[in-house]
Image: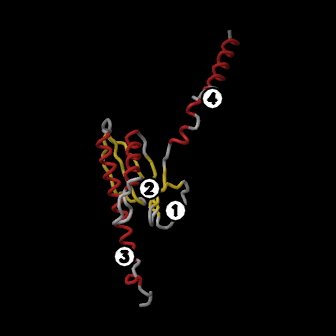
Amino acid sequence: MKGMRLLFFLILFLTMGLTGFAQDPELEGFLDEGTMDEAVVTEEGTQTLILDNTRSKIGRDFYELFFQHYAELPKMPGLPVPTDSTRTIEPNLELGLTAMVVTIDELPAFGVGTSIIVVSLNDQIVWQNYVQIRADVLELYAFNAAEVINQYVINYQDVQNQLDNEDQLGSGLF
């Protein structure tokens, strides 16, 4: 009786260890190819690294909509909006001095179907709001956040160009 019990537990533990190998062959490599947690969007002048730190479906949907809208927006003042999604996504994460890091964080909120989404640029919070699970509201919030971040980057570039002007540089002599 004791030997049967030992044999039963031995077989039970061995079969539990093999359950990890019973993965669906159709899903092999699907998660590696299908997910994109970070991307580098380059336009004339700046590189923008967009990081996804979301935890739920609401946050993931917001990230995808934000990325879609942000990549379509013009990155320089006066540039027309591209109609054929002519953005460049580079797999390397080596960023230059003009790089911007956009981080999308999701914080827990009270209530069912809501989250707090925080969009920060270079560790400075630029946009934060409660977001509902409704798709139309989520899309409007993502578009608004993308426009706010894009306008912030354009204004930042404009100020940097004004500061790099020859009138502002000076000679360094007093």
Q: Which mark is residue 95?
A: 1
Amino acid type, callout 3: Gln
Question: What residue sits right under mark 2 in the picture?
Answer: 86
Amino acid type, callout 2: Thr
Q: CA distance from mark 2 to mark 1?
A: 20 Å
User: Which mark is first along the chain, 1 or 3?
Assistant: 1
Question: What residue sits right under mark 3 in the picture?
Answer: 162
User: Which mark is first along the chain, 1 or 2?
Assistant: 2
Dot 4: element: helix
User: Which mark is first along the chain, 4 or 2?
Assistant: 4
Residue at the location (34% across, 42% down)? 115
Residue at the location (53% across, 39% down)? 31
Say few, some or many: other residues with alpha carbon within 10 Å of mark 1 (under 14 / 14 to 19 / 20 or more).
some
Amino acid type, callout 1: Leu
Say few, some or many: other residues with alpha carbon within 10 Å of mark 2 (under 14 / 14 to 19 / 20 or more).
few
Which is closer to the viewer, label 2 or label 1?
2
Residue at the location (55% across, 56% down)? 92
Q: Which mark is residue 82?
A: none
